[in-house]
Image (tube, rainbow, N blue to C red):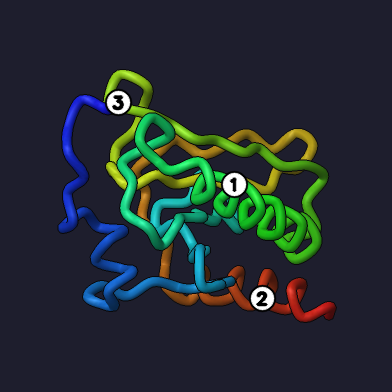
Amino acid sequence: MSTSAYDPNNIFARILRGELPAEKVFETDKILAFMDIMPRADGHVLVIPKTPARNILDIQPDDLAELAKGAQMVAKAVKVGMAADGLTIQQFNESSGGQVVFHIHVHVLPRWEGVALRPPGTMAKPDVLAEHAGRIRAAFAGG
């Protein structure tokens, strides 16, 4: 099991409750996908389960399966919507594993030949996030 209990006031739980805004790109009854506000690549999306779980160590297997299915669907739309050459998919667990927000999440990062990831920690402009989200939502809609 994970080293600590789930904190219902983490930033992603607050987004799920509608207490904080997010630029959403896809949602089902089980998962939510939204733009990372500190993207390491244009079109960087986070996919989270709607059920509370700190990380892979305590998420229920069925919820993990739904998260994986959602991440795959989002990855396909991100690749098309952002006209990416490839994708990097990341998932971190516990502080020593690189986890910063303790609600399990999957990073979907579009990648292009010769373009490095940006360093972490730079906020994106809301209009840029909205434009990228629009391209990804259009890919879900088939156009």
- Alpha carbon separation for disc pair 2 and 1: 22 Å
Residue at 53% over, 48% down: 62
Residue at 33% over, 69% down: 16
- Alpha carbon separation for disc pair 3 and 1: 18 Å
Cβ atoms under marks 3 and 2 closer than 8 Å? no
Image position of 36 (left or right of 77)? left
Q: Which mark is residue 20?
A: none
Residue type for callout 2:
Arg
Q: Which residue is mark 1?
A: 65
Image position of 82 (left or right of 64)? right
- Give the mark, 3 or 1, whose residue is nearer the N terminus: 3
Where is residue 7? Give x, y as percent.
Answer: 17, 49
**Where, quadrant-wise, is the C terminus in this rendering?**
bottom right
Residue 97 placement: quadrant: top left
Residue type for callout 3:
Met
The answer to which of 56 and 36 lies nearer the viewer is 56
Q: Residues within 10 Å of mark 2 (few under 14, many from 20)?
A: some
- Alpha carbon separation for disc pair 3 and 2: 36 Å
Q: Which residue is mark 3?
A: 1
Residue at 17% over, 39% down: 5
Q: Residues within 10 Å of mark 1 (few under 14, many from 20)?
A: few
The answer to which of 56 and 83 lies nearer the viewer is 56
Label 1 element class: helix
